[in-house]
Amino acid sequence: MGLLCGVFVSEDQVLEQLRVCSAEDQIFDVVGKHKAKLTVNHVSRAVGMLWQFQKEKPQLLRTIDLIRCHPQFLTLRVLAENKIALMDNCMLVDMLYTFLRYRQIQTQFNVDPHDSLVQQLISEAWLRLDRLSMASLSKFAICLSDLHLQHSPLMGQITAILDEKLPTINDARILTILMISVSSLVSPRLRDALINRVDKLLDTTDPTNYNTPRRVVQFLRNIRYNHRPLLEKCNQILLCNIPRLNSEDIAIIMGLFQSLQFHNCDFRVSAKQRLIELIDSSTDPFSFTKLFVSLAPLANAEIREELENTTLLLADEFSIHQALAVIEALEEIQSRNLSLMNKMASVIQRNLHLYKPVEVARITQAFLLLQYQNPEFFTRLRNTLANFLLHSVFPSEVTMLTRVLTILPCPRLDDGGISRVSSVVSQCSLNDLNTISFAVAKLLRNDPSYRHNTPSKYVRLLQNLNRCGHERLRTADRLDLLLEELKYISGEWFEEMLLEDVMVTLQRMMDQINGSNVSDLALLLTRNTHLCPPLMEHIANVAIRDIDKIHHSSIYATLLPFCVLNYDPEKEDELFDICIQRSFDPHLLVLLGYSLALADRFPEELIKEIFSINFLGKLDVQLDTLSNSLNLRVRQRLMELNRAMCLECPEFQVPWFHDRYCQHLQKKGSGSISPVQQQIHKMLSEVLGGMNCVRLSVVTPYFYTVDFECILDKHLEPLAYNEPNTLQISHIGNVDWGNNSLESIRSELPPGAQRVAVDFLDSKSFCKNSHHMKGETMMRKRHLEILGYRVVQIPHFEWNSMELSTEGAWKEYLKKKIFGEVSS
């Protein structure tokens, strides 16, 4: 009995000695002195404390390599492997988790799956899977993800356990960890159940724990599911935690939001301010890189210059992934800092052999978009990409490598590359097939055999693409998956080969349209400008029926095709009335207002809100945080809405405040005339009696540009112009024709005379599958008529038709358009 007590006292002494250790060396001393007496509890305590000490150190001060190579650490590994059977469930999983942290560091986050200790720990945990607590199960799931086993049967079993025990999970941290781990395996039913459960748990979670909502957003990103209400809830929690976030936290969150196309004005403004506060403390490569990637796209020119100068000083210390992140950020802000680009090219070229295929593709794309000039560098990138392509087996990777190789100067693929592309085509998504079609079309134009009408390897590949695309559409049965594949598709191949089949497939799946996917479908129709009345009517009906299930940020997208494509559904008034009774972010409200103007709708409350001083101030703040492209689009739409209000609703007394903006756009414009416009100009001058009877590219009040203008007297005889074809801007800021104001436009003409605007309408003025005129063209016509014009439109399909193939036929056509329509 005394002996047993002595053993327990000895064990207690070892645990006590471990408990008071304050550094790794002290732990190793205890392990070395008592290695023969160490129990499974001692091993677990020692391993856990070693990792805890490392976690508490800043990234740059960690000594992982020294710990991992220490003889006593190897002793702990051997003891752990020998005592696996003695470990309880929690200890078993903790041990696996901790040892994987060290293996990840050793292999630069690429865990060695053949580690015998790791293998035995996983095997034992698998045997005990049903007996693990949810906390241990979540940690075990992390370990499997570290080992790239997200699609393994073992992860499938964890998914089934999660599904079964979901109602009993009350810890949001445990649930969100499991959600991320099993995200690649969840069904739509389980996805919805997980979202509902975590939505409830977020209401009772400590609001200062920002990692929980971050993991929720990461889950949504992983499953590519833009669940707006849950995103809004997570955003509110994260927004409250901005003062506690560091640059890494903000970089991760903003990256996730960007992937989900979630743009919240308040978060971006607050994040920008927090990042500016962190500039002085972000001096090491790790923290500075995170800061640069997040802040540079939001910052003004002065801060950007400061960030770029610091980047230049730190560049040589960047890791390969930090260098990649920086060059992509430089591309996003369209930097023109040649010294920095040269430096980053040097750093990347030095470590090019360490990058993965997709990373080299991203590097190449970034430098190309920056218009960087370095033939030797691009030659090396091309050779590296071509070599990767020959050995790649992943369809998405083959697609990206092929695309980037063909945007390099003098695009080419050897037979090995073509063969590799052909081998994966049958496994590609519609988006990948479309991307490959772009690449093949470019290669085709550079293929000598095609120019000589001989069989081409590229032609055969295109035929294979067509077959695979049609087959994928024929077998599609889930609308959500199809919309995901079609989300970013555009281009000639898609329009010519697949678009009609896509519409047939979508109509086959109309019963699957609901409040969560109706906006994605609406965007697809808008982006492809394809008018499909059955789908449009169904979208309108679903929007009216499920308006409470459509997030307010998706309302704009849902209404867009009706406005852009100029289509009035049967329940038009009900659709518009129910949709505009929602709240919107400032930039979305402007876009919505413009879309409604296309449809000739001007809700008074909405318009007054947009043009209030308070709102325009909020909009200015938000615009500074948006991407350059979205910023420019919103500013353009605000100008066009302002113009529409002045012309169509003068009773609202909205002032015109876009003179300078429009003048700036005019100065930037190319002013080039297309060959068709030159042809029409020549014909018009002959029909009207001379060059002095027609003016070209006339800028009207409110800055519309009319292709051609002429004046007919009351007898329909052309009047000659005596003044130069220029726009006059008066000193008080009004836009005039000559010396006349808008109010006196009509009175400046002789009695009975009329201004005629002749507009050539190219294919962009019409829906792609018909001669149905789009909303923008219709609004322009309305506005020109308000300005006093009679508008003559020349559709491209009429001007280029077989009937008008001679000069005489064209002239007769113009006469009928200009003189015949009036007399009739």
Image: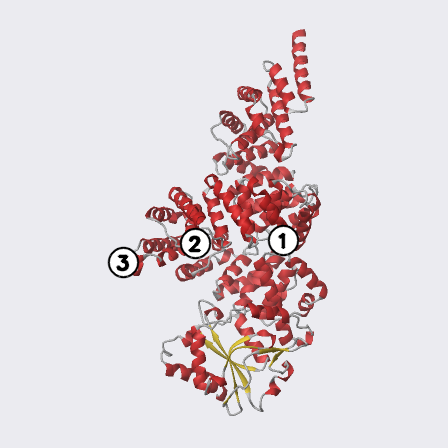
Q: Nearer the viewer, mark 2 or mark 3?
A: 2
Residue that protrudes farthest toward the front in the picture: 339
Q: Earlier in the sequence, mark 2 or mark 3?
A: 2
Quarter holding the N terminus is: top right
- Residue 36 vertical placement versus 311 (above, below): above
- The circle on residue 454 is 3
Q: How many neighbours does mark 2 have within 10 angstroms: few (below 14), some (14-19), or many (20 or more)? A: some
Q: How many neighbours does mark 3 have within 10 angstroms: few (below 14), some (14-19), or many (20 or more)? A: few
Q: Earlier in the sequence, mark 1 or mark 3?
A: 1
Q: Amino acid at mark 3?
A: Thr
- Residue 138 vertical placement versus 756 (above, below): above
Q: Nearer the viewer, mark 1 or mark 3?
A: 1
The image quadrant of residue 165 is top right
Secondary structure, mark 3, is loop
> How was this image coloured?
secondary structure
Secondary structure, mark 2, is helix
Q: Which residue is mark 1?
A: 298
- Residue 390 vertical placement versus 467 (above, below): above
